[in-house]
């Protein structure tokens, strides 16, 4: 160290400025390695001396800190041991990984990023946090990222979307048998609607866009089976005491109905707390049947039952081997005591000889409109003559807003 040896001890003291031209590579190495054997470097390591000149070091030496300015290449550090404290990334800086194994950062969501198979994804640094609600609840901004659960009929009211900002989110899970209603603030909307209904066992993730909310999954949880039965040699298919406020609508699906008696029509009636309703004008119905010959046969009337497959002659439901009659009925608002229960149906009948019928229509139980306030609790399917030899019937709960 020829140049270093020419420096007098008096020059390496507190407050002095050493010209960088007098320092060769060997001195730089001593400085970077913090060689404690040379006590003359103590003044530099304690930041009490400035090195000036055209090659001035831009950063002062700091204990327990790595400071490095680079041009794009970055700092490579191997075998790092985290001693204590937090690993802090710049709050406003974004780091996008470009290769597998790299770690990045998204300053907007405050999440780490990794690249897997060429795709950048966020690392879930926050586990799901369950927050059970037993009564109606005002959602808080601090609930971000939580899963709010409820097992009873309740309402969850959202904060103003503008105050939450974009990307704020929660999940709501219905773990019970009643409906959960989610309401936005004021005139804000959820998926363009002024409320969201989450059916039993359904869930929804709500994402704020700054002015309202979007749902990222299906709060309806599909159709939920309520009850099923296999009918053999019975007078009717009767689901009694099954309609509640848990679902706004229900679907009754009848598959493979075979009558004991040949050439019959299929009827529907509903039941209330007072039993099966069969007054002479209890039902307003309209039925349309399209037969193989493209003839359309229609019927409508007020009667003691609703006809589901009106036809004349021998083109009705038969017990011919291989014949099949299938039927879907949607029952709307059966729990209402203020509105008529409206039922919409469609079905098909086929025979091995190629004959087929298609039928659709509606029927309404209209006694409620006339002053009866009992809710509809069940539905019955029967035939114009004889028993049902066999059929499979399933009732589903349907959910909507």
Image (cartoon, rainbow, N blue to C red):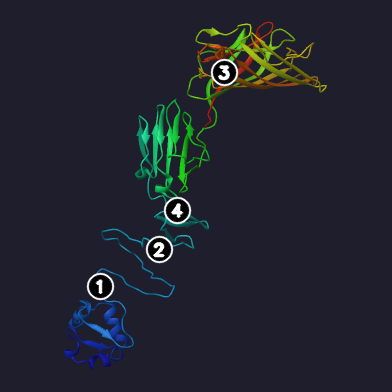
Mark 3 residue element = loop
Quadrant in the picture for residue 110: bottom left
**363 vs 316, nearest the viewer:** 363
Report which residue position mark 3 lands on: 340
Query: Which one is earlier in the sequence, the residue at label 4 or at label 1?
Result: 1
Q: Are marks 3 and 4 in contact (CB under 8 Å)?
A: no
Report which residue position mark 2 lands on: 93
List x then y, in percent, for residue 10: 16, 90
Q: Residues within 10 Å of mark 4 (few under 14, many from 20)?
A: some
Mark 2 vs mark 3, foreground winner is 3
Q: Are marks 1 and 3 in contact (CB under 8 Å)?
A: no
Report which residue position mark 4 lands on: 122
Q: Residues within 10 Å of mark 1 (few under 14, many from 20)?
A: few
**211 vs 15, nearest the viewer:** 211
Mark 4 residue element = strand
Residue at mark 3 to residue at mark 4: CA–CA distance: 51 Å
- Horizontal side, residue 213 vs residue 68: left or right: right
Mark 1 vs mark 2, foreground winner is 2
Residue at mark 1 to residue at mark 3: CA–CA distance: 80 Å
Q: Residue at x 62, y 7 (%)?
A: 235
Report which residue position mark 1 lands on: 62
**286 vs 255, nearest the viewer:** 286
Residue at mark 1 to residue at mark 2: CA–CA distance: 23 Å
Q: Residue at x 60, y 18 (%)?
A: 393
List x then y, in percent, for residue 28: 30, 83
Query: Which one is earlier in the sequence, the residue at label 1 or at label 3?
Result: 1
Mark 4 vs mark 2, foreground winner is 2
* Vertical relation: 318 (above or below) 5: above
- Horizontal side, residue 252 vs residue 310: left or right: left
Query: Which one is earlier in the sequence, the residue at label 4 or at label 2?
Result: 2
Q: Residue at x 36, y 29 (%)?
A: 135
List x then y, in percent, for residue 245: 48, 22
């Amino acid at each position: 160290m020829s140049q270093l040896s020419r420096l007098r001890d008096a020059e390496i003291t507190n407050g002095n400025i050493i010209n960088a031209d007098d320092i060769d590579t060997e001195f730089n190495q001593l400085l970077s390695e913090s060689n404690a054997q040379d006590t003359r470097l103590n003044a530099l390591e304690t930041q009490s001396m400035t090195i000036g000149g055209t090659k001035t070091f831009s950063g002062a030496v700091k204990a327990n800190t790595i400071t490095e300015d680079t041009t794009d290449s970055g700092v490579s550090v191997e075998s790092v041991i985290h001693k204590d404290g937090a690993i802090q990334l710049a709050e406003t800086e974004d780091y996008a990984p470009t290769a597998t194994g790299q770690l990045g950062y998204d300053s907007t969501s405050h999440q780490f990023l990794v690249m897997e198979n060429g795709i950048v994804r966020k690392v879930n640094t926050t586990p799901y946090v369950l927050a059970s609600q037993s009564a109606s609840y005002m959602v808080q901004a601090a609930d971000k990222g939580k899963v709010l659960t409820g097992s009873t009929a309740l309402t969850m009211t959202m904060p103003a979307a503008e105050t939450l900002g974009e990307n704020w989110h929660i999940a709501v899970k219905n773990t019970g048998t009643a409906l959960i209603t989610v309401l936005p603030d004021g005139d804000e909307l959820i998926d363009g609607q002024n409320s969201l209904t989450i059916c039993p066992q359904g869930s929804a993730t709500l994402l704020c866009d700054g002015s309202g909310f979007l749902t990222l999954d299906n709060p309806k949880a599909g159709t939920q089976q309520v009850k099923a039965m296999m009918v053999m040699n019975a007078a009717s298919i009767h689901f009694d005491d099954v309609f509640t406020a848990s679902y706004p609508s229900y679907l009754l699906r009848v598959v493979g109905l075979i009558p004991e008696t040949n050439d019959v029509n299929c009827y529907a009636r509903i039941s209330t707390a007072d039993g099966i309703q069969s007054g002479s004008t209890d039902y307003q119905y309209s039925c349309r049947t399209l037969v193989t010959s493209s003839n359309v046969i229609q019927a409508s009337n007020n009667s003691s039952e609703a006809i589901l497959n009106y036809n004349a002659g021998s083109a009705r439901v038969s017990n011919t081997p291989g014949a099949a009659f299938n039927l879907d009925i949607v029952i709307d608002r059966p729990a209402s005591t203020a509105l008529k229960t409206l039922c919409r149906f469609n079905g098909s009948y086929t025979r091995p000889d190629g004959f087929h019928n298609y039928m659709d229509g509606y029927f309404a139980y209209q006694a409620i409109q006339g002053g009866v306030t009992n809710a509809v609790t069940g539905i019955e399917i029967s035939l114009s003559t004889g028993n049902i030899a066999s059929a499979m019937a399933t009732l589903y709960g349907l959910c909507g807003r």
